[in-house]
Amino acid sequence: MKTYANGMDTRHQILYACKELFYEKGYHETSYEDICKSTHVSRRTVYYHFKDKEDIRYEVFWEWITQMRHLAERYCERSEYTFSLAMYLAWECSLRDEKYRKFQMDYYRDYPVYDPKVGSGRFYKIAFGQMYGHIWSLEKIPSIAFASVYGYILGMYWMMCEHPEIYNAKELFHYCMFWGTSIWGIPHETIEQLWSDLMGYAEKFPADLLVEMKFY
C-alpha cells in the first residue's frame, strides 16, 4: 500500500509540475529535461507514469476542465448541465487568459483533423457525450457529422485567437452549440430549451468567478 501511495504521489507531482510548465512556457516549449528538473525525477520515472508527453497534456487539459466544472457546480444543482457550463467557462478562460488560449490553440493545431482516438479529438467525443448525452443519443450521429462540427469549432477558435477583443464567450458558445447540433440533427426546440436553462444558470455566475481558476 505504501508503494502505491508513493507512486500516486509521484504521478501527481509530475502532473502538477506540467500544469505549471505547459501554462507558463507552453506545451511545445516544455522539454522532458524541464519536467525532470521541476519534479526531481528521472525521465524513466516520467515514462513509468505517462506513456509520453502527449499523454500528460491530455491529463492536464482534463484537470483544468474539471476545475471549471467544480466552479459551475456551485451555481447549478443539475448534474447534466455542469459539463456544458464548464465548456462555457472554458471559452471565457480562452478570451481572458492569453496563456490558456495558447495552450488550447496549440492543441487544435496539432490535431486539425478529427480523430476520436487521439488528442483534442479524443476529448471532443467525450465532451459532447457529457453535454448532450442526456437529450440525444450520440450513436445516431455519423462520424462525418462529428468531423464537420469539430472543424467548425476549430475555425471559430482560430477566429477568436486572432481577435479575442471583438468576441464574447456567450456569442461563441451559442454559435458552436446551435450550428453543431443542427448538423447532428438534434431538434432546434430541444436546443433552445437547453440553451435557456444553461444561460439561466450562467447568469448566476459572479463576474469574478474565474479569478478562482488556478492553472497550477
Image (spheres, rainbow, N blue to C red):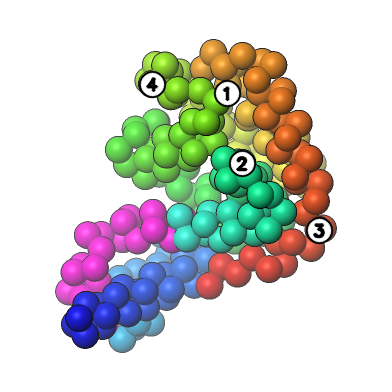
**Label for residue 180?**
1
At numbered mark 1, what does the secondary structure look like: helix, strand or loop? Answer: helix
- Left or right of 52 on screen, residue 71: right
Q: Earlier in the sequence, mark 2 or mark 3?
A: 2
Which residue, given by chain and number where applicable, does mark 3 sit on?
206
Estimate the spatial distance between the alpha carbons at disc 1 and disc 2, rounded to whole Å. 17 Å
Which residue, given by chain and number where applicable, does mark 2 sit on?
81
Q: Quadrant of residue 56?
A: bottom left
Q: Earlier in the sequence, mark 3 or mark 4?
A: 4
Residue closer to the observer: 191 or 163: 191
Asked whether residue 110 appears in the rendered view, the answer is yes
**Label for residue 139?**
4
Q: Nearer the viewer, mark 1 or mark 2?
A: 2
Q: Is residue 53 above or below residue 192?
A: below
Q: Residue furthest front?
A: 77
Q: Circle 3: is it few (<14), some (14-19), or many (20+) Cα within 10 Å?
A: few
Q: What range of the chain is rendered magenta? A: 41-61
- Amino acid carrying mark 3 in the image: Pro
Question: Is residue 105 located in the magenta-colored stretch of the structure?
Answer: no
Q: Nearer the viewer, mark 2 or mark 3?
A: 2
- Left or right of 163 on screen, residue 125: left
Q: Earlier in the sequence, mark 1 or mark 2?
A: 2
Q: Are marks 1 and 2 in contact (CB under 8 Å)?
A: no
Estimate the spatial distance between the alpha carbons at disc 4 and disc 2, rounded to whole Å. 20 Å
- Amino acid carrying mark 2 in the image: Tyr
Q: Nearer the viewer, mark 1 or mark 3?
A: 3
